[in-house]
Image (cartoon, rainbow, N blue to C red):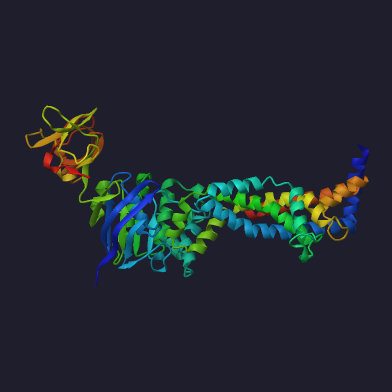
Amino acid sequence: MDSALYHLEGVSRCYGASRALDRCTLVIPKGGVMGIAGPNGSGKSTLLKLLAFIERPDEGRVLFEGKEEVPFSPTVRHRVTLMPQTPFLMNRSVFQNVCYGLEVKKDRVDVAGRVAQALSRVGLDAKRFAGRYRHELSGGEAQRVALAARLILDPEVLILDEPTASVDAASSFLIHQAILAFAARPGKTVILTSHDAAWLEGVSDEMLFFFRGRRVKEKMGVMLFGPFEQDPLSGAWLKCSEEGVIPVPAPPDPDAVAAVPQRSLRMGHEASDREVGFNAEVRETARRKAQPDAQVTLIGAGFPMTLSCPVAHAPEPGEIVRVSYPLSAVQWL
Amino acid sequence: MDFIVDGFFRALVLLSHGDPQTFSAVATTLKAAFLSMGASLLLGVPAGFCLGYYEFRGKKTARTIVDTMLALPTVFIGLLVYAFLSNRGPLGGLGLLFTIPAISVGQTILALPVITALTAACLDSLDKGLRLTLISLGADKGQLFMTTLWEVRYGIVAAAMTAMGRVMTEVGISMMVGGNIKWHTRTITTAIALETGKGMFAEGIALGLVLLSIALVVNISVSVFRR
């Protein structure tokens, strides 16, 4: 039996003249956590809307358990649910917001008990919160109510678009806990994006990487946007910017986008004959207890990136470090 | 000035003694308004929903036409309805001229653009996240429609109140297609116009007070609903 939950075949989605997702083909297996990563505008949210059958693709097909499904299809309506980045709570009480999904399913079994349980899963006390309205909730509480409204449905597929974006640390922790508890249950699939790249990589069984509406093979550490210029003397192709000059291989066209995989980037090494590089400013250094490596967030070539290095050699914020990579590692997107 | 004050007190006497002519006009007004409001809500809310919720070619043109219809003069509506319902008109065979349904038809034309335009404006300003949320929580198309309308319920009530205000206070349509026939098609507003013409201010003021009272009752009901 095919264990794939989703098959996307050449799926494209356009908004006006902009192509948010471009001929995307992929398979998502049943069960586990699938993380989706990519910079802003890479098509992650569009992909999630298509996977949740909120929108139809303009081209291609979205297959769910081998069958093509569309929005409002009875097969997927109560099995797949999406929590958007900005949660929307209806102009009714928290209780009514959480039980709305049960109402539409005409499921009236122990509604009060299940609402209380769903709220407690996200760290909210039903007695205190059930009667509140959206204007009486903080951003983090609203996000947790939105998650409770999904968890009460006990879906097979839970899709989360940046579930902890713009919420406080306490809410973020509780949301992460609730997601992990859900994902640990047998037969459940979680598909999510998160700005917290380290957390996303940590919880995901598999990762998909996107850039400009296209799926890319691996996580890109840095991207260099055209135009590129050719040095008339040496013939080398260069990306010239205020940050400096960065050599690249010959581009397919002057406005192409170059990407260097994360795994090819090294910090603190001097450029050699086979390696090129650029200077980057350290913005943040995160050291975690019992972890041998620190996570260093840098800005270089106009692009933010997070690299790891041994805690003993971790640079401090404000320092300028050299980031290098083999010229052969550059990919054209 | 005395005749106004005197008219006011005589109006209270007329109302407290249950003057049959006054109450006949009130009943006719309410019947016509009930029919026209029912019809305009039934047609106007779905039309406003389509106009505000969906994106389609010609939407801007449709909005402009509906907005223009907001300024339709009641006498012009009366003229059109009269032309259609008179013996020479295409609907003359229905025999509706100078009846309450005829007044309701005209008032529906008056109220429909108000309901449609204000409902569309409510839906236009609705957070786009609602649709995504409802579909993701498993709503079907019918539930999506009903829940969306429920979310803008106060806006629709405000639209209905505005339309009701226009319908209850118009004179042109009731006069032209109702004919202001005593005991049959005389409404509060046509009666006020007639009584004022005759110099009978007490009756006119009494009827005006009834109109205000109806507006007050409707507003109190809406306040209770909002709570």
* Residue furthest to the front: B88
Name the one closer to the observer, B168 or A91: B168
Image quadrant for the N terminus of chain B?
top right
**Quadrant of residue A180 in the image?**
bottom left
Q: Position of residue B191 (x, y in %)?
A: 86, 51
Asked whether residue A286 appears in the rendered view, the answer is no
For residue B103, side relative to residue B40 (left or right): right
Asked whether residue A110 appears in the rendered view, the answer is yes
* Residue furthest to the left: A273
For residue A260, side relative to residue B146 (left or right): left
For residue A175, side relative to residue B120 (left or right): left
For residue A312, side relative to residue B169 (left or right): left
Q: Position of residue A13 (x, y in %)?
A: 35, 53
Above or below for A322 versus A135: above
**Quadrant of residue A148 in the image?**
bottom left
Residue lying at 73% horizontally and 54% vertically, measured from the top left: B107
Q: Position of residue B129 (x, y in %)?
A: 45, 51
Residue lying at 37% horizontally and 59% vertically, measured from the top left: A52
Residue lying at 54% horizontally and 46% vertically, measured from the top left: B60
Q: Position of residue B77 (x, y in %)?
A: 73, 51
Q: How many marks?
A: 0
Name the one closer to the observer, A43 or B153: A43
